[in-house]
Image (cartoon, helix red, strand yellow):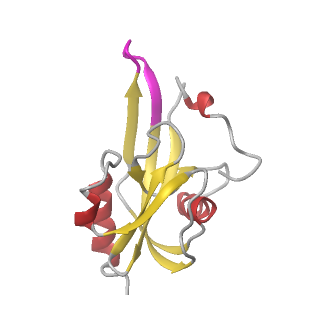
Amino acid sequence: MSAGSEEPAWRRRYPVRPFIAASAAVVRDGRVLLAARGQEPMRGIYTLPGGQVEAGETLAEAALRELHEEVGVVAEVAAGLTPLEVIERDADGVVLHHFVIHPHAARWLSGEPTTGPEALDLRWVTAEEAHALPTTKGLHGVIAQALAVIGDGA
């Protein structure tokens, strides 16, 4: 999220509506950039850089903004990919979190990824290497889609 517009994570608990997010599956030399989440929920789990869409921002703009803010990488979007839904319920079955995430296949342009508060670790991985990591649900399908769109990133 952009500075100044960040809301506390607790405000996203027990939502009255789904939150819309966007992410970027950045491909460079046949590898995809994954980030280990620095914040709860799912701290330490590998996923794509991304975050909430701000009012007035397209999904692609949000994905690229979040990519740059979180890890310092610049990319160009090649295609939108199949959206994912993350719905978590508490012990009573009440919706605790609900996010609709729109991933994008993107080509790396510049910047070497750097860790920070939102990314504990960063790795360029092949689709096969991603299977050895703890990842968010649906990530492997998104990686396959991105690699099918971008190819080897050349």
Q: Looking at the rendering, which quadrant does residue 126 occupy?
A: bottom left
| Image side of residue 145 versus residue 61, left or right | left
| Image side of residue 19 versus residue 6, left or right | left
Residue, x 27% and y 72% (percent of image)?
148
Q: Nearer the viewer, residue 106 or 72?
A: 72
Is residue 93 a member of the stretch shown in magenta? yes
Q: Looking at the rendering, which quadrant does residue 128 occupy?
A: bottom left
Residue, x 32% and y 78% (percent of image)?
30
Residue at the right extreme, as displayed: 4
The correct choice, above or below, for 92 with respect to 32 in the image is above
Is residue 85 a member of the stretch shown in magenta? no
Residue 55 visible, this orientation: yes
Q: Quadrant of the C terminus?
A: bottom left
| Image side of residue 101 versus residue 131, left or right | right
| Image side of residue 71 versus residue 29, left or right | right
Residue, x 59% and y 63% (percent of image)?
61
Q: Nearer the viewer, residue 22 or 47?
A: 47
In the rendered structure, which segment of residues is drawn in magenta? 90-98
The correct choice, above or below, for 143 with respect to 137 in the image is below
Residue, x 60% and y 68% (percent of image)?
72
Residue 121 image point, x, y percent: 47, 57
Residue 103 image point, x, y percent: 42, 57
Q: Nearer the viewer, residue 129 or 109?
A: 129
Residue 24 visible, this orientation: no
Residue at the top extreme, as displayed: 92
Residue 142 image point, x, y percent: 32, 58
Residue 82 image point, x, y percent: 34, 55
The correct choice, above or below, for 89 with respect to 34 in the image is above
